[in-house]
Amino acid sequence: VLPLLSPSPVVDSPASAAHLLWLVRTGRARSRSDLIELSGLSRSSVSTRVEQLLAAGLLHEAGPGRSTGGRPPRLLSFNRDAGRVVGIDLGVTSVDVAVTDLAGSVLAATTDDLDIADGPDRVLARTDELTAQLLRSLGCGKGDVRAIGIGVPGPVEHATGRLVHPPVMPGWHDARVPDHFADYGCAVLVDNDVNVIAVGEQSRSPQLTHFLVVKMGTGIGCGIVLDGHLYRGSAGSAGDIGHIHVDDERTVLCACGNENCLEAVAGGAALAREAAQLGLPVATPRDLIGLTVEGDRQAVALVREAGRRIGEVLAALVNFANPSCIVVTGGLARAGNPLLAGIREAVYRRSLPLAARSLEIRISDRVDDAGRIGAARMAIDGCLDEAHVDALLAASN
Ligand SMILES: [Zn+2]
């Protein structure tokens, strides 16, 4: 059993078995000849590694392919059933859990209400219970799980998977989430919820190599993918745009202690409060979204203005990082067009023509389950990286 892991930025060596496996499992290669061509390795190196991957049960021979003259090539396929993966999206008021195969297809999923302020012991015990139930419903157990991916609504120290002063998770500072899943005996990867969603979006749109995911819920955060890689910064807090200072005629105190953070001015909680002050029947951000969707003029105007405020910050990010796409997600994204219109207005007005020319801004089509699917994708990549695949091969050969 390999030690628990924090999210790993390690890029597999192109000569590794993990890289060959990646070429097959992502559909890039279907035969030994494809692998030779794509990896640049010799026929005998590819053949040795493929035999090892077959013996370890990670690859299958899938029968003969179409002949291009000579002997038809024997096709290879990834054994997506060589294990199970768990994706967990911990929110402030709910938890989503999915069990997937090694290709990321959801086999079973569930959602439950919880209060993140109950602290790590209670919340993670409940999460473990839900996971065990899902596994049982599929006829498997903890031993079938190859990796667990968990997204949390707070900053995670990249090297250890430890939470560091999460503003909306009282009692979680210093919590080591992986320790709570030690009895699974597999890799446990913990990351900020927005980073996890970015991984999910990337796996669904592999052609996207430079993009931002903006999650707007109670708080506001941003996942950054540059050159095909999730960018976490030196400690793991990159993309925490909710606490960028914005100009406002009012002075609004933020939960972090600073004044006029983006989140304090345009986050879901701030908008709900503002709507209630205007006399709208709104107690939660969800109520405000309901009114917006129904077309209430004041609610629409509030959401559109929030979109503009967020767009002003995004315009600076667009000038800085030159993404080709911004994907908007989170609870507020359900407000739809008024939010998108506000964001687009500010971004296109304020960003440089070259940066804005080919920029697409859209609402995610997976607002509801992007978190747990992304967490599962993160877990799959984590348990099929070079170190883990080498360990699996060593154990089976
Ligand atoms: Zn703040």
Image: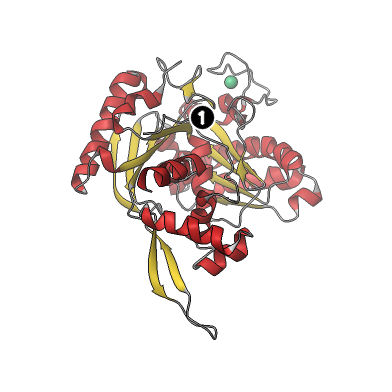
Classify 373 as above or below 181: below
Q: Residue at x 46, y 22 (%)?
A: 168
Q: Residue at x 52, y 17 (%)?
A: 255
Numbered label tally: 1
Answer with left or right where residue 39 lies relative to residue 312.
left
Q: Where 51 falls versus 127 (above or below)?
A: below
At 57% across and 37% down in the image, what residue appears?
9
**Looking at the picture, which amino acid does disc 1 mark?**
Gly
For residue 392, what is the image quadrant?
Answer: top left
Q: Quadrant of ligand 1?
A: top right
Mark 1 vs ligand 1: CB under 8 Å?
no
- SS under mark 1: loop
Coordinates of residue 55 in the picture (x, y in percent)? 37, 55
- Residue that mark 1 sits on: 219
258 lies above or below 286: above
> Which quadrant of the view contains residue 331?
top left
Residue 368 seen by the camera: no
Quadrant showing the N terminus: top left
Residue 47 location in percent, x, y? Answer: 50, 61
